[in-house]
């Protein structure tokens, strides 16, 4: 299904969830929208992708990066994880606008 249909279906899927899971899943959907923001409207999302599946991927990363008793993933890192999970391309703005390493012209080394 295309990304708009997918996001709409994800919102419908969480309507029956109880708090606090509903709020957490709503946040995941917000991150899904960010993750898909650089994809065309025609981008197809596989039918087996779910909010829970995305949550599980984020939770894995948080556990991997755990410091003491705290595991944390920010929303833009979560968007990157979700993009990978959904098969989409997503590049954070901080990486897109970061200065590129200047290219070295080999001709400059020769007289």
Image (spheres, rainbow, N blue to C red):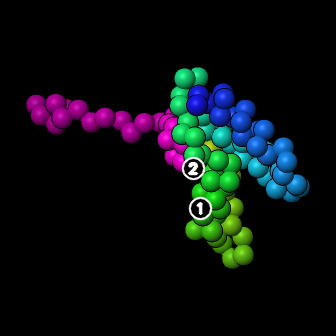
Looking at the figure, which quarter contains the C terminus? Answer: top left
Marks 1 and 2 close (CB-CB < 8 Å): yes
Q: Position of residue 101 (x, y in %)?
A: 39, 39
Image vertical order of residue 73 relative to residue 79, above or below: below
Q: Residues within 10 Å of mark 1 (few under 14, many from 20)?
A: some
The kind of secondary structure element at disc 2 is: helix
Estimate the spatial distance between the alpha carbons at disc 1 and disc 2, rounded to whole Å.
Answer: 8 Å
Q: Farthest residue in the top direction?
A: 41
Q: Earlier in the sequence, mark 1 or mark 2?
A: 1
Residue 62: in sight, yes or no? yes
Q: Position of residue 15 (x, y in %)?
A: 84, 43
Residue at figure coordinates x 76%, y 49% from the top left: 25
Looking at the image, residue 14 sits to the left or right of residue 99; the answer is right
Residue 20: which quarter of the image?
bottom right
Check if residue 100 falls in the magenta segment: yes
The kind of secondary structure element at disc 1 is: helix
Q: Give 76 or 89, whichever is nearer the viewer.
A: 89
Residue at figure coordinates x 73%, y 32% from the top left: 8
Residue 37: in sight, yes or no? no
Q: Give 42 or 81, whichever is nearer the viewer.
A: 42
Magenta-tinted stretch? 82-111
Looking at the figure, which quarter contains the N terminus? Answer: top right
Residue at which label 1 appears = 61
Residue at which label 2 appears = 81
Image vertical order of residue 87 relative to residue 97, above or below: below
How many numbered circles does the render carry? 2
């Amino acid at each position: 299904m295309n990304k708009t249909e997918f996001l709409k279906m994800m919102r419908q899927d969480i309507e029956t969830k109880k708090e606090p899971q509903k709020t957490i899943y709503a946040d995941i959907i917000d991150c899904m929208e960010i993750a898909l923001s650089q994809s065309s409207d025609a981008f197809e999302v596989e039918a087996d992708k779910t909010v829970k599946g995305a949550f599980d991927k984020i939770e894995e990363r948080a556990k991997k990066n755990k410091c003491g008793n705290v595991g944390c993933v920010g929303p833009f890192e979560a968007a990157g994880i979700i993009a990978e999970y959904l098969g989409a391309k997503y590049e954070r703005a901080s990486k897109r606008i970061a200065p590129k390493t200047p290219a070295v012209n080999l001709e400059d080394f020769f007289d």
